[in-house]
Image (tube, rainbow, N blue to C red):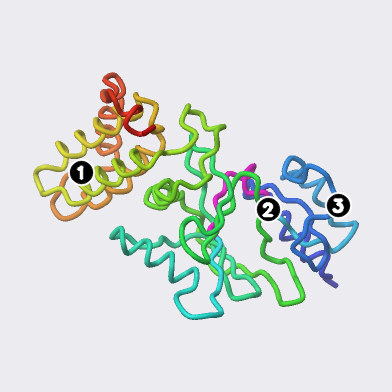
Amino acid sequence: MGTQRDHLTEWAQHLAARGWHVFPLTPGSKKPPAIARWEQRATVDPGRITRCWRAGAFNIGIATGPSRLVVVDLDTNEGDGPDGAGQLARLAADRGVTVPDTWTVTTPSGGRHLYFTAPAGVCLRNTQGDLARHVDTRAGGGYVVAPGSLVPGGGYELADDTDPVELPGWLLLALCERRSTAISPRSVTPVATVTGYAATAVAREAERVRTAAPGQHNRILSNAAYNLGQLVGAGLLDTATASHALTDAAQALMTGDCDCTPREIARVIRAGLTAGQSRPRRGSRRKDAA
């Protein structure tokens, strides 16, 4: 006969098989147990998981940083105005895109956790309300309560088992535009945060690409990549942020009779960024420091 402990063990093993690092939470709670360094001790080892959950019906935490996840936490709104889901949809609509389907968990309060994989080369940290009201994110240094877990108000349940997609470029850019603390100084590039000047440039170039006229796609994409590459060379922007923003914007080019392909788009962006980095934009540092 199955027990709650067996149920939680099965969920923990399933999540670990996905490569997500799990650790025990206090039974019936969202709080970590009294253990030190829970982020470092989170594991994907089946044997350790079995031994741990054999000791009790612990709820499950997923350490988002080691799992290379960015989870967008959409809260409900008990007052007037849109809730977290509505706020995120509005943010996407302002950029002419939609929120993609991805692995989704519902919370006992009626909220949702959207799971995205973290972009390569970018270190993200937790944010609270930086994207919009009732919209938080969990990344490095954070954790989320996993499906299968139970609290007095109900359970965390898997609502969409679509494989997690990579954090969209427009969402990464939105975090940069809010000048949040999401990008850590531990980034693989020397850029700790993207300045307002650079974020504005990224948004402008992305919009140029998104609205490029037929027959002008290659030229405009190449020029946009070169311009952002100059900011990368000046130390004002990291390559991953620029590449993801341009790649996301370029999805609009692959319509109709256009012969743009993902491989060609990637090649043009890579070449443009490389060329721009060799000729850093002069005077940008001084202007931004004023």
Please give the residue where the numbered disc 1 appears in the rendered image: 260
Q: Nearer the viewer, mark 3 or mark 2?
A: 3
- State whether residue 211 is above or below residue 232: below
> Which amino acid does the dot numbered 1 rest on?
Cys
Q: Earlier in the sequence, mark 1 or mark 2?
A: 2
Crowding at dot 1, Cα within 10 Å, few <14 / some 14-19 / many 20+, comes out as: some
What amino acid is found at the position of numbered circle 2 in the picture? Ile
- Label annotation for residue 80: none
Determine the residue positioned at 29% across, 41% down: 201
Q: Nearer the viewer, residue 57 or 276?
A: 276
Q: Is residue 71 left or right of residue 2?
A: left
Q: Is residue 217 above or below residue 25?
A: above
- The boundaries of the magenta stretch are 62-72
What is the CA distance from the residue labelled 3 to the residue labelled 2?
16 Å
> How far is mark 1 from mark 2, CA to CA?
39 Å
The foreground one among 274 and 234 is 234
Residue ID at (18%, 51%): 211
* Residue at the farthest left position: 215
Q: Nearer the viewer, mark 1 or mark 3?
A: 3
Asked if the residue at tag 2 contacts the one at tag 3, i.e. Cβ–Cβ closer than 8 Å, the answer is no
Kindly state the secondary structure of the residue where label 2 is placed: strand
Q: Residue tagged by mark 3?
A: 34
Question: Which residue: 36% across, 34% down?
Answer: 290
Camera-near label (1 vs 2) is: 2
284 relative position to 81: left or right: left
Q: Residues within 10 Å of mark 3 (few under 14, many from 20)?
A: few
Q: Earlier in the sequence, mark 1 or mark 3?
A: 3
Residue visible at 73% across and 66% down in the picture:
149
Q: Which residue is mark 2?
A: 62
